[in-house]
Amino acid sequence: MPSKLVARFFSDSVPSNDGAERVQRERRLSLHLQSELGTRAVVLDDRKLPGTKCHIDHLLVAPSGVWVIDAMEYDGRVERRDVGGWFKVDERLYVAGKDRTHLVDGIDRQVIAVENILATEGFEGIPVHAALCFVNSEWGWFAKPFSLNGVWVAWPQKLTELVLDWNAIPNTEVDRLARVVGSRLPAAA
């Protein structure tokens, strides 16, 4: 056990590849989402993307729309940096001083798949939001969730606030929409 702690300490902010740790991280986030959102949203965990080996950590159906949520666990501070120049904006996601913008770009395929499913089922007007939720990472004192290339970057408590921040669909449609999405994106396990 001590060798694992030393390995994680010197891991240079690399996410865990240990399946058990990934499952625990996703389970903690799922429990948080379910307890904070209660009956106001439906949480669908670990969903397969049809025709691929990819999966979605969490799908959340709420009055604000459908949320595609990827659970992340990195050591170090999460921040947005502008690495552009004087006349160019180039915002990036940094974790522990390393550029992790590829995490933002990686969720696009999942969002597109959900949008296509909604469109084929007659729900083309439903907003689909993407979020990277950093579990157990560091944030500055005055940190706020931020959007980078259309993907929200937040921690669990702020993510639930974002989900509840606006209404795009009636509460009565949430369960029906969740059933459709759940049937088209089956559980991975």
Image: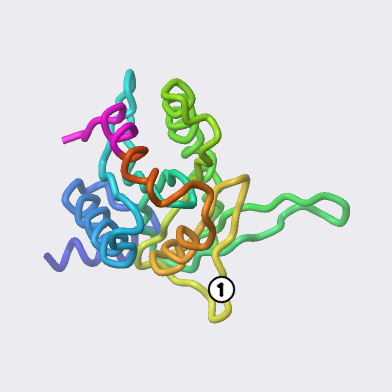
In the picture, measured across the screen, residue 17 lies left or right of residue 156, that is left
Quarter of the picture containing the C terminus is top left
Q: What is the number of callouts on the image? A: 1
19 vs 167, nearest the viewer: 167
Residue 170 colored in magenta in the image: no
Location of residue 101 in the rendering, given as x and y in whole percent from the top left corner: 56, 47
Quarter of the picture containing the N terminus is bottom left
Location of residue 11 in the rendering, given as x and y in whole percent from the top left corner: 34, 58
- Residue marked by disc 1: 143
Q: Indicate how the structure is coloured in the image.
A: rainbow
- Residue at screen point 82% across, 54% down: 85
Instruction: Give the secondary structure at mark 1.
Output: loop
Location of residue 166 in the rendering, given as x and y in whole percent from the top left corner: 54, 58
Tell me the magenta residue range.
Answer: 179-189
The residue carrying pointer 1 sits among few (fewer than 14), some (14 to 19) or many (20 or more) residues within 10 Å by Cα, namely: few
Residue 37, above or below 112: below
Residue lying at the far left of the rendered structure: 1
Q: Mark 1: which amino acid?
A: Ala
Residue 11, above or below 117: below
Rendering quarter of residue 81: bottom right
120 vs 31, nearest the viewer: 120
Location of residue 126 in the rendering, given as x and y in whole percent from the top left corner: 51, 38
Residue lying at the far bottom of the rendered structure: 141
Residue lying at the far right of the rendered structure: 87
- Residue at screen point 54% across, 62% down: 97
- Residue at screen point 72% across, 50% down: 90
